[in-house]
Image: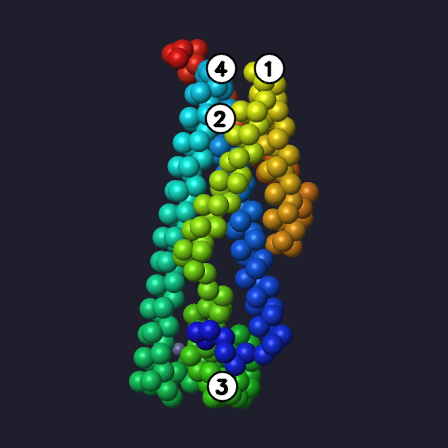
Amino acid sequence: MADGRGAGGGEESQHRLGTLLNGLRATVLGANDGIVSTAGLVVGVAGATPQREALLVAGIAGALAGALSMAAGEYVSVSTQRDTERAALARERRELADDPTGELEELASMYRDRGLSEELSRLVARELTDHDALRAHAEVELGLTRYRVDPWQAAFASLFSFVLGALVPLAAMLLSSDVWRLPVTVVAVLTATGALGAVSARLGGALPLRAAVRCVAGGSFAMLVTYLVGTLVGTLAPL
Ligand SMILES: [Zn+2]
């Protein structure tokens, strides 16, 4: 169960592919987050003030804060999940040592619940227990696969992808002239978020167009709301 030794070669490569796809999807989603939240922020500030310095400061601070918050959240959530899984595995290991007969019976009953006959569920439970009892219980009883994420790796991946995504609205805002600033940013953000949405749907086996439309709608909504609020604030309390 722990590191997959003794698994067949096909299963192993399928497992690696799953890990890779999961990582890619997380990266794409992180980048999308960075694009949309930073775009909302800079468009909101642009609604309040035409000052380039204000945009620069707000954009960089927002991108950094968002990236760090996402990395910290990812670290906490992945470590918590890992600790929970470890505790469950330790409990399972103890139960297997203390009451092997009861655990065998438990495994067989879980296969019965899933629709196997009395005889077959006993046979399956017996053979899986002989092969790797802990792994059998982990997979069937706890629903744990062998896929493990390292919390630090998850944290750095989301930090990096968020910053990368944030660069899209930041670059569009800061590199374009005053007149073109807003339209260029909107087009760049919607193009990037739509493309990433389609890619992430593809990786997950879902419909790319639907995901792209959803991302573009979400991005438009975020920018529209913050622009309106920014304009309102800029009008009420000009900087
Ligand atoms: Zn068990």
Of mark 3 and mark 4, the one earlier in the sequence is: 4
Query: With respect to residue 74, does 14 lie above or below?
Result: below
Residue drawn at (53%, 35%) of the image = 167
As drawn, the label of residue 50 is 4
- Classed neighbour count for the residue bearing mark 4: other residues with Cα under 10 Å, few (<14), some (14–19), many (≥20): some
Give yes or no for contact between labels 1 and 2 (Cβ–Cβ under 8 Å).
Answer: no
Please provide percent x and percent y for residue 196.
61, 43
Q: Specify the amino acid type for callout 3.
A: His
As drawn, the label of residue 179 is 1
Residue drawn at (53%, 24%) of the image = 174
Q: Specify the amino acid type for callout 4.
A: Pro
Of mark 3 and mark 1, the one earlier in the sequence is: 3
Badge 2 is on which residue? 42
Q: Is residue 91 rendered to the left or right of residue 49?
A: left
Residue drawn at (38%, 62%) of the image = 82
Please provide percent x and percent y for residue 178.
56, 16
Of mark 1 and mark 2, the one earlier in the sequence is: 2
Of mark 4 and mark 1, the one earlier in the sequence is: 4
Q: Distance between the residues labelled 3 and 4?
A: 68 Å
Query: Ligand 1 falls in which quarter?
Result: bottom left
Of mark 2 and mark 4, the one earlier in the sequence is: 2
Badge 3 is on which residue? 131
